[in-house]
Amino acid sequence: MTNTTIDLIDTHCHLDMDAYSADLDLVLNRAADAGVDTIVTIGIDATSSKQAVRLAERYAQVYAAVGIHPHDAANATEEDFKTIIELATHDKVVGYGEIGLDYARNYSPETIQQQIFSRQLQLARELNLPVIIHDREAHEDTLCLLKEHAPYPAGGIMHCFSGDMSFAEKIMELGFLISIPGIVTFKNAHSLHEVAATLPLSSMLIETDGPFLTPVPYRGKRNEPGYIVHTAQKIADLAGATLREVAAATTVNAQSIFKLNS
């Protein structure tokens, strides 16, 4: 059923991943039917950043972000950085990321993650792009490095927010937006429920992080942009707002930080 009453933006998806390779056109059609008229597909290394830009070139409703994920920090080469910088000048590249720290998996040593993160925060400023931050079990060091490299004239996004309201307030002090994923629909996500209920809509974005983190009622299946309506509805329920209000506010926020109407 086509949704003609709301417009939503999925601010963080990985459309280049193999999970979408067989039916991407159908995925995008379903997204449009659900009211998702814009999707930002996110690079995690030089190769996926190239693919993100290619997808943005192919589909009018798709934009791209480029960057090197903390998982890949140890493998980042100077050639990779050269590629990222070149891609960043493309007119459909709207963000730098995802970048940051991940101490849950530690696929790259923490010191290397911090070095690559710092370098990319500086690059994002030079390129005048908003930063898209990955922070998993690394709140203290993430915040420390973000403060060290502040301010962020182009803005920033805390992707897939996993902290509490106190941490959210510290992030917002830097002028960042907080992006809420489908995890908010999980019954045991109590801290995120509090954040979604308390956070001003003016500071909020929504995302799928597809193909990961699928919201209820599709949990356990592949995530896709059209499912973001369930995340938006849960936020509305928690915040005492309407779906239309959540959709309108988060869409305006996304359009502003990504300069989608300029």
Image: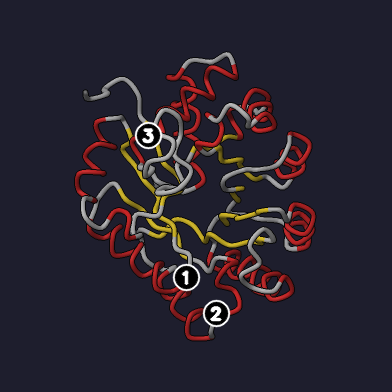
In which quadrant of the rendered image does the N terminus lie?
A: top left
Please name the residue that numbered disc 1 is placed on: 45
Instruction: Using the rendered view, name the quadrant where residue 43 is placed.
Output: bottom left
Q: Is residue 45 above or below residue 242?
A: below
Q: Secondary structure at mark 3?
A: helix
Q: Position of residue 14 (x, y in %)?
A: 40, 55
Ranked by sequence position, the earlier of labels 3 and 1 is: 1
Q: Position of residue 99 (x, y in %)?
A: 58, 62
Q: Nearer the viewer, mark 3 or mark 1?
A: 3
**What amino acid is found at the position of numbered circle 2 in the picture?**
Ala
Q: Secondary structure at mark 1?
A: loop
Going by the image, does 229 lie left or right of 154? left
Q: Residue 76 shows which numbered tag?
A: 2
Residue name at image x 49 percent, y 24 percent = 246
Q: Are marks 3 and 2 in contact (CB under 8 Å)?
A: no
Q: Dot 1, how many residues are within 10 Å of its Cα: few (below 14), some (14-19), or many (20+)?
A: many
Residue name at image x 44 percent, y 56 percent = 94
Q: Position of residue 210 (x, y in %)?
A: 41, 47
Please name the residue that numbered disc 3 is placed on: 227
Q: Is residue 144 above or below residue 47?
A: above
Q: Are marks 1 and 2 in contact (CB under 8 Å)?
A: yes
Q: Nearer the viewer, residue 54 or 44?
A: 44
